[in-house]
Image (tube, rainbow, N blue to C red):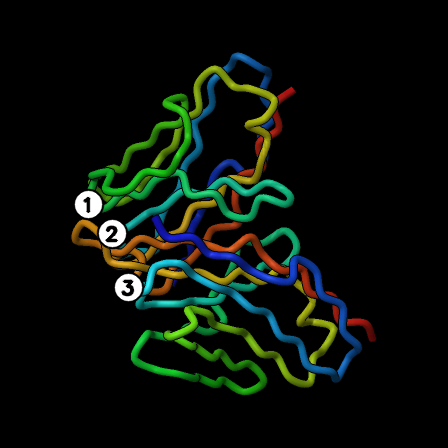
Amino acid sequence: GENVEQHPSTLSVQEGDSAVIKCTYSDSASNYFPWYKQELGKGPQLIIDIRSNVGEKKDQRIAVTLNKTAKHFSLHITETQPEDSAVYFCAASIRSGGYQKVTFGTGTKLQVIP
Amino acid sequence: KAGVTQTPRYLIKTRGQQVTLSCSPISGHRSVSWYQQTPGQGLQFLFEYFSETQRNKGNFPGRFSGRQFSNSRSEMNVSTLELGDSALYLCASSYDGGNTEAFFGQGTRLTVV
């Protein structure tokens, strides 16, 4: 089955700096890559996603890049703010048996230091 | 529209007991997935239900089971609880499964003593 690796597991940055989280996936047939943010005491919430026919997507301070050849995708957060502190999960989705299966990475705890 | 509702929010059970958790998805969503979240283990997939049928299952023992009703509400059951079952259990609803945005509930925090 699909395997998703996520790095780093923890990340500390100064407010205003950029943060980058990287994920790799194993199955080249994966075609949907969402990113989720989980704040303390809450469930994960989708922040951005990308499909396999697109190489990059941006939404204000957040961007995701996808390299299908290398089978990795990355989350980029620019001008980080304290409210960006949370756990971030990447995921890869693949069509199998007539429906999509989602596999999550192990998460990255981001701390933005004021 | 109302979000995903999980009940109860917190549970304390004794080893050997069983527990049932409930998840009400967003109206119109047919897919409900369950995840176990423990520190350092990320989101471990339990199973997915779609239109009352289990169509995907993770690598958990048979003590973990679930079902989905005709209104898409879902329950998961854990029998013969073990200390290691202590975790946050999250459910996620989506319109059609893994190719569309999943909306998570706040989870049920289960503590087994």
- The Cα–Cα distance between marks 1 and 3, rounded to whole angstroms, is 26 Å
Disc 2 on helix, strand or loop?
A: loop
Q: Bin the neighbour count of mark 1 within 10 Å (Cα to Cα): few under 14, some 14-19, many 20 and up.
A: some
Task: Name the amino acid type tagged 1.
Answer: Ser
The quarter holding residue A15 reads: bottom right
The residue labelled by disc 3 is A29
Verify CB contact (< 8 Å) between mark 1 and mark 2.
yes
Whole-percent x and y of residue B58? 37, 38
**Subunit that carries the residue with mark 3:** A
Instruction: Report which residue position mark 2 lands on.
Output: B30
User: In this rendering, is residue B109 above or below A64?
Assistant: above
Residue drawn at (61%, 79%), measured in percent from left and top? A77
Q: Are marks 1 and 3 on the same chain?
A: no
Residue A59 position in % (x across, y down): 49, 84
Q: Residue at x 34, y 59 (%)?
A: A27
Say if labels 1 and 2 share a chain: yes
Q: Residues within 10 Å of mark 3 (few under 14, many from 20)?
A: some
Quadrant showing the N terminus of chain B: bottom left
**Residue sitting at the far right:** A114
> Where A15 sits versus B76, above or below?
below
- Indicate the secondary structure of the residue bearing disc 3: loop
